[in-house]
Amino acid sequence: MTIPALAELREAVWAANQAIVRAGLVTLSFGNASGIDRESGLMLIKPSGLPYDELRPEDLVAVRLDDGGVVGSELRPSSDTPTHLVLYRAWPEIGGVVHTHSVAAAAWAQAGRPIPPLGTTHADHFHGAVPVTRRMRPSEIAGEYEAETGSLIVATLAGVGLSADEMPAALVASHGPFTWGRDAREASDNAIALEVVAAMAAQTFALDPATEPIASELLERHFRRKHGPTAYYGQGRR
Ligand SMILES: [Zn+2]
């Protein structure tokens, strides 16, 4: 692959795959991170079933956004590739997608419950409750299962009236979390934040099942510190 942008993307997507392992979000080989180069229309994603500790940047598989075809690789891309492609096609503003079976977030997915915003950790990353999809129908499970999963995520976000930027995560019922962001790094950061927020919410409800969501003013203040035209948190992008 001689496209210069792809060499940089290869390192970034590899780093995102390592980051979710380091953060303890990956059991065995469940999980995958991808990133896309919109210019060439190529997505790089983890190969299917390859142990993370053996993964090298050059192992990442390039897949065409338009038809899912593999470009220049002997390895098969992650079996979740069609889900990633559906999200990239639906939301041109995103550049990275991460999927894990991280325990706390997957627990909310298995319970079929959205994660309500209870504090500022949540509000810093997610503009409201992290939505959960409905359970998949037998026809969806029997059909193009992975692509149907992507379509269900897109429909779920539309259903709660939030953009991919406002809500960079969704829980797939009976399955686990997907997160995304402007690039692979942001998608893995959101996966890490989601896991912490899911664990905090479960512990909060264990202490007090009647806990109310964060005040809307405080949610707005924290979300807008980091997102959109009025953001002022951190040092900007370096
Ligand atoms: Zn999965």
Image (cartoon, rainbow, N blue to C red):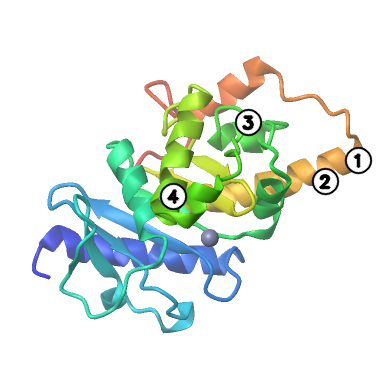
Amino acid type at mark 1: Leu
Which tag, 3 or 1, sits closer to the chain's start?
3
Compared to residue 110, the image places residue 230 above or below, namely above
Amino acid type at mark 4: Ala
Compared to residue 173, the image places residue 166 above or below, namely above
> For residue 112, what is the image quadrant?
top right
Which tag, 4 or 2, sits closer to the chain's start?
4
Residue sitting at the far bottom: 54
Q: CA distance from mark 1 to mark 2?
A: 6 Å
Q: CA distance from mark 3 to mark 1?
A: 20 Å
Which tag, 4 or 3, sits closer to the chain's start?
3
Residue 30: x percent and y percent? 54, 68
Residue at figure coordinates x 41%, y 41% from the top left:
151
Can you tell which of label 3 and label 1 is closer to the viewer? 3
The residue under label 2 is 203
Secondary structure at badge 3 equals loop
Question: Do callouts 3 and 1 mark residues in contact (Cβ within 8 Å)?
Answer: no
Q: Judge left or right: residue 124 versus residue 89.
A: right
The residue under label 1 is 207
User: What crowding class fits label 3: few (fewer than 14 Cα within 10 Å), some (14-19), or many (20 or more)?
Assistant: some
Q: CA distance from mark 4 to mark 2?
A: 24 Å
User: What crowding class fits label 1: few (fewer than 14 Cα within 10 Å), some (14-19), or many (20 or more)?
Assistant: few
Q: Judge left or right: residue 115 versus residue 3.
A: right
Amino acid type at mark 3: Ala
Secondary structure at badge 1 equals helix
Residue 8: x percent and y percent? 23, 62
Question: Do callouts 1 and 2 mark residues in contact (Cβ within 8 Å)?
Answer: yes
Please give the label number shown on residue 129: 3
